[in-house]
């Protein structure tokens, strides 16, 4: 027997949870379907636990800078409060009852299980107690997110490697760790663990870490990591992974060398959870990496998609932004609809990397007549005053014909905060000539943005 509802939301990551709550508050009959934890990757296995690790690790690093600046301090790292904070404050010991209650308090319904499409307007949920079937009149919203991608390295699958879902639950740190992949996850966790005394090696197949960022950003972060003892190896081919109780993991590299460590974190990208969603039942390709959506987040008739599965940036703020749009679309309200001109992001390494819009390479590929300007943060007044820990660079990318910024990168202490200024400029297409007449407070880090803009040759 099928039950009739207005809307089904399959997958309750940050975007799906928001859609379900908003539509339920608007008076629709909304069913939220989640097979693991309501809230998704970000609160339980991603952003929040990792940033709690990083906050603690950065406090240790700042304390270690005291001798350069004013006195002495003894730093004794202890992981126990970090693990406890993640369990108690962030994840409620990986229990989502609060989030489930919040959805129900908003007027929504909830089913724990694997949801899938079974044709237009039809949803099936496999629960522990059996199969539930729903007829959905207004629409289905997909927010099924991603899972860690595990590369097909010989031997790897048979070892007890960690992914992000394991590393956030670690109670005792290993002495040594290999991180497979020098992207955002790999770099953030590598540095956090290293600051707690773990000897970390990053193995990155590409020719630089943080590949989506400007090369200048990758270089500054790699230099800062190397300076604190992290072994960053780029351009490496991993040929095999083995595991024995001692020494633990052995990672063999092309050329014959091998590295051993007590732990191995696989942070090699993500795969979208689309293959078992019944997409073929509504005429969509279940093997597609991402779902195509229009500006209202529609992926088909009465079908919406939000979050990582849309491929518009695997970030919580993108998922939430899209959720707002899907809600307006489902309720028949007006736009503004989705615009990705000024998507910003922050990678929480130290120095942090803030970025928005197009990189120089992306702007050139888009056929834009590009002008760039950059400035080394240590040369700015604030960078010079800051001294220890002042690694950083600002880079701006302009469309010389339109006289506006189309992208920018802010690497440095508070790099993720500094990007706000450039994000506003890109989003609102503020003329560069106007940016040059602005007051930039002295001596702030963001004053270096003015220096970079002055370097633009246009
Ligand atoms: C370690 C790490 C750190 C990160 N740090 C940041 C950060 O600092 N800032 C930032 O913006 N982003 C960060 N991200 C990315 C961020 O977590 C995601 O972009 C964010 O969670 C949005 O994802 P989503 O809305 O697509 O859904 P997800 O959070 O991926 O949630 C999808 C949900 O759908 C469920 N699901 C899947 N299939 C089904 C099904 N068939 N039926 C029922 N339920 C299903 C899953 O169990 C999951 O709960 C980080 C990610 C990781 C892994
Ligand atoms: N601060 C943030 O906003 C934040 C933090 C973490 C993650 N995230 C999001 O999560 C996404 C996933 O992060 P991620 O770091 O897993 O993915 P990623 O795609 O950013 O990086 C994965 C890295 O692994 C490398 N790699 C892949 N296969 C390899 C192999 N066999 N050997 C060596 N290296 C290999 C890739 O070249 C790449 O550099 C990010 O793209 C980002 O959108 C965001």
Image (cartoon, rainbow, N blue to C red):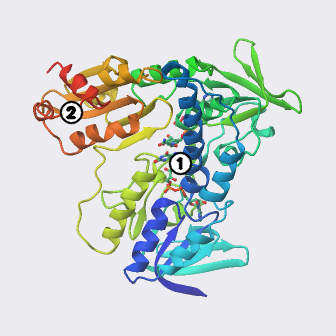
Which label belongs to residue 236? none
Q: What's the residue at 66%, 36% (across, down)?
A: 266
Say which of marks 1 and 2 sits in front.
2
The local secondary structure at tag 1 comes to: helix
Q: Work out which quarter of the rendered image holds the N terminus and state it.
A: bottom right
Q: Disc 1 designates what residue? A: 47
| 125 and 224: which is toward the camera | 224
- Going by the image, does 451 lie left or right of 171? left
First reached walking from the N terminus: tag 1 or tag 2: 1
- From the viewer's perspective, is 341 left or right of 139? left
417 up-or-down from 387: above or below: below
Query: In this view of the protein, which residue sits in the foreground, 425 or 70?
Result: 70
Q: In the depicted view, which residue is nearer to us: 423 or 413?
A: 413
Is residue 26 left or right of 433 when viewed as pictured?
right
The residue beneath circle 2 is 440
Kindly give the residue lying farthest to the front in the view shown: 71
Q: Is mark 1 within 8 Å of ligand 1?
A: yes
Quadrant for ligand 2? top right
Q: Would you say 415 lies left or right of 290 here?
A: left
Q: Is residue 208 visible?
A: no
């Amino acid at each position: 027997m099928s039950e009739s509802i207005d809307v089904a939301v399959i997958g309750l990551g940050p975007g799906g949870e928001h859609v379900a709550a908003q539509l339920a508050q608007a008076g629709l009959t909304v069913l939220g379907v989640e097979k693991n934890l309501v809230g998704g990757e970000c609160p339980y296995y991603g952003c929040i636990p990792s940033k709690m690790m990083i906050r603690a690790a950065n406090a240790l690093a700042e304390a270690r800078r005291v001798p350069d600046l004013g006195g002495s301090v003894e730093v004794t790292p202890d992981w126990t409060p970090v693990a406890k904070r993640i369990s108690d404050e962030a994840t409620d010991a990986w229990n989502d009852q609060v989030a489930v209650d919040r959805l129900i308090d908003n007027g929504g319904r909830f089913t724990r299980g694997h949801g899938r499409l079974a044709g237009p307007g039809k949803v099936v949920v496999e629960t522990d107690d059996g199969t539930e079937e729903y007829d959905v009149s207004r629409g289905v919203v997909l927010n099924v997110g991603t899972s860690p991608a595990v590369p097909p390295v010989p031997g790897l699958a048979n070892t007890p490697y960690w992914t992000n879902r394991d590393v956030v639950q670690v109670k005792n740190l290993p002495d040594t760790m290999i991180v497979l992949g020098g992207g955002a996850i790999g770099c953030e966790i590598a540095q956090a663990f290293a600051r707690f005394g773990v000897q970390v090696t990053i193995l990155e197949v590409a020719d630089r870490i943080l590949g989506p960022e400007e090369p200048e950003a990758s270089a500054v972060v790699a230099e800062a990591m190397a300076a604190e003892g992290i072994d960053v190896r780029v351009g490496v081919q991993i040929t095999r992974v083995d595991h024995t109780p001692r020494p633990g993991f052995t990672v063999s590299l092309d050329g014959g060398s091998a590295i051993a460590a007590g732990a191995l974190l696989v942070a090699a990208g993500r795969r979208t959870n689309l293959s078992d969603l019944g997409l073929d039942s509504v005429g969509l390709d279940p093997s597609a990496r991402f779902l195509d959506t229009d500006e209202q987040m529609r992926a088909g008739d009465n079908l919406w998609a939000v979050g990582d599965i849309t491929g518009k940036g695997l970030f919580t703020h993108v998922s939430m932004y899209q959720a707002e749009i899907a809600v307006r679309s489902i309720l028949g309200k007006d736009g503004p609809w989705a615009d990705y001109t000024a998507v910003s992001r922050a990678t929480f390494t130290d120095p942090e990397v803030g970025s928005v819009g197009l990189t120089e390479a992306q702007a050139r590929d888009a056929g834009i007549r590009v002008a760039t300007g950059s400035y080394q943060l240590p040369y700015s007044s604030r960078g010079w005053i800051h001294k220890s820990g002042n690694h950083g660079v600002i880079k701006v990318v302009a469309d010389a014909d339109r006289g506006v910024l189309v992208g920018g990168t802010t690497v440095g202490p508070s790099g993720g905060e500094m990007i706000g200024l450039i994000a506003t400029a890109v989003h609102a297409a503020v003329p560069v000539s106007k940016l040059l007449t602005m007051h930039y407070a002295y001596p702030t880090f963001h004053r270096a943005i003015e220096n970079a803009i002055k370097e633009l040759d246009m």
